[in-house]
Image (cartoon, rainbow, N blue to C red):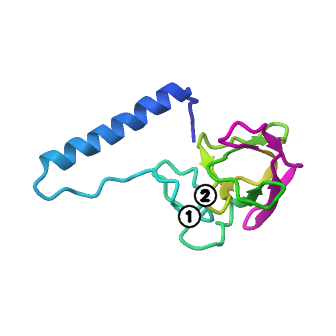
């Protein structure tokens, strides 16, 4: 799969275009078709897919050629950190390609990311401006899930 990095402004413009197109379809159609939405209320415990059509596994088991890194992000008092960005970087040499996706924590502070096997560094960037926190290296194995706990300051 060949990917191309896009900047944050291009991503915002693309999302606005999708939303505006959906709004136009709703106003023009007699019986509107459902418009896909990007909602933080989706279950973050479902793996995010790197497939172009956005599909993900319906069950909790990762596919045989992929693994899952999942976790919960909390404050030192145990409160869930909501809408924190989760960034993954390959520590392998040569690096394992990482899907160009944005993964955020859900209302319970959970995230889940479907990845190729390898060693990864997981960094959490809280939405409230709290400094980012990087977890120790995580080993992702095919067909398995690796769960981690991350505490932000």
- Magenta range is 124-153
Check disc 1: other Cα within 10 Å, few if <14, some if 14-19, many if 20+.
Answer: some
> Can you give x and y, in whole percent of width and height, for residue 28 in the image?
13, 45
- Within the image, what quadrant is residue 101 found in? top right
- Left or right of 88 in this view: 22: left
Please report the residue visible at 23 percent of the width from the left and 57 percent of the height from the top: 33
- Which secondary structure lies at badge 1? loop
Q: Is residue 137 magenta?
A: yes
- Left or right of 110 in this view: 29: left
Kindly report the distance in space between the C-alpha atoms of the residues bearing marks 2 and 1. 7 Å
Mark linked to residue 69: none
Asked whether 5 or 34 is in front, the reply is 34
Check disc 2: other Cα within 10 Å, few if <14, some if 14-19, many if 20+.
Answer: many
- Left or right of 42 in this view: 146: right
Q: Is residue 106 visible?
A: yes
Mark linked to residue 106: 2
Query: What residue would you read off at disc 1?
Result: 43
Please report the residue visible at 81 percent of the width from the left and 48 percent of the height from the top: 152
Asked whether 51 or 71 is in front, the reply is 71
- Within the image, what quadrant is residue 59 found in? bottom right
Asked whether 47 or 17 is in front, the reply is 17
Q: Is residue 57 above or below residue 74?
A: below
Q: Is residue 140 visible?
A: no
Task: State if disc 1 and disc 2 touch (CB < 8 Å).
Answer: yes
Q: Is residue 107 magenta?
A: no
Please report the residue visible at 77 percent of the width from the left and 56 percent of the height from the top: 74
- Which secondary structure lies at badge 2? loop
Toward the right, the furthest residue is 136
Front label number (2 vs 1): 2
């Amino acid at each position: 799969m060949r990917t191309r990095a896009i900047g944050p402004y291009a991503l915002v413009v693309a999302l606005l275009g999708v939303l505006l197109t959906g709004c136009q379809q709703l106003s023009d159609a007699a019986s509107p078709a459902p418009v896909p939405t990007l909602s933080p209320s989706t279950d973050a415990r479902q793996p995010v897919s790197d497939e172009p059509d956005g599909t993900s596994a319906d069950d909790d088991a990762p596919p045989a050629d992929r693994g899952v890194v999942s976790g919960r992000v909390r404050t030192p008092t145990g409160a869930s950190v909501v809408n924190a960005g989760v960034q993954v970087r390959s520590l392998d040499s040569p690096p394992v390609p990482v899907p160009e996706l944005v993964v955020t924590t859900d209302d319970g502070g959970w995230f889940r990311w479907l990845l190729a096997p390898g060693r990864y560094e997981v960094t959490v960037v809280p939405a409230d401006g709290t400094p980012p926190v990087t977890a120790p290296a995580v080993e992702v194995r095919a067909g398995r899930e690796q769960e981690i706990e991350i505490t932000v300051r």
